[in-house]
Image: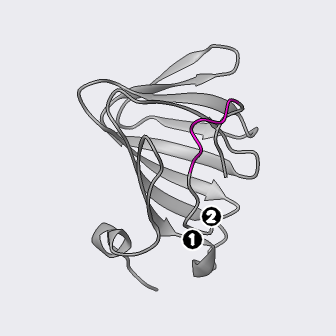
Amino acid sequence: MFTRTLAEVEAGPNFVDWGNGTSHRLLTRADGMGFTVTHTVVRAGSESLLHYRNHLEACTCIAGRGEVEDEEGTVFPLEPGTIYVLDQHDKHWLRADPGQDMVLISVFNPPLEGSEKHDLNNPDGSGY
């Protein structure tokens, strides 16, 4: 058993500014759990085109509000207590409402190394 705090992660290489927010990689491949858990902040008013070709991801909103939009244009509102699941390596737009950051707890499978960063200029969607 072990514990890890946001402050501990923030002091090391597993705290990443991914372009439109920050990500505390609380669990990574090195922890041997077979998945990653992150505490992700999505900056207020930001919009990111994301596409995780190598990972499945599930995200639960714990603070703030926003939306996720799939490739077909269906928009799903996000608020505390809402989970969205990218079970098909879905390309998606992630947006945080203006005025307040949105905070997500995310799980990735397979796990992240921990230092991955987005390329938000990738027209095919940024991913790891």
96 or 18: which is nearer to us? 18
Figure disc tally: 2
Q: Is residue 122 magenta?
A: yes
Q: Is residue 52 left or right of residue 105?
A: right
Q: Magenta stretch?
A: 118-123
Q: What residue do we see at 39% from left, 38% from top?
A: 81
Q: Magenta segment: does it hold 85?
A: no
Q: Which mark identifies residue 125?
A: none
Frontmost residue, 118 versus 80: 118
Q: Which mark, by number, is residue 28?
A: 1
Horizontal and vertical percent position of residue 72: 70, 15
Position of residue 102 measured from the top left corner of the image (x, y, whole percent)? 34, 37
Res. 101 image quadrant: top left
Q: Position of residue 112 (x, y in %)?
A: 62, 64
Which element carries disc 1, helix, strand or loop? loop
* Mark 1–mark 2 distance (CA, rounded to whole Å): 5 Å
- Residue at left offset 54%, top offset 17%: 75
* Three-letter residue code for mark 1: Thr
**What's the mark number on residue 112?**
2
Q: Nearer the viewer, residue 69 or 33?
A: 69
Circles 1 and 2 in contact, beta carbons < 8 Å: yes
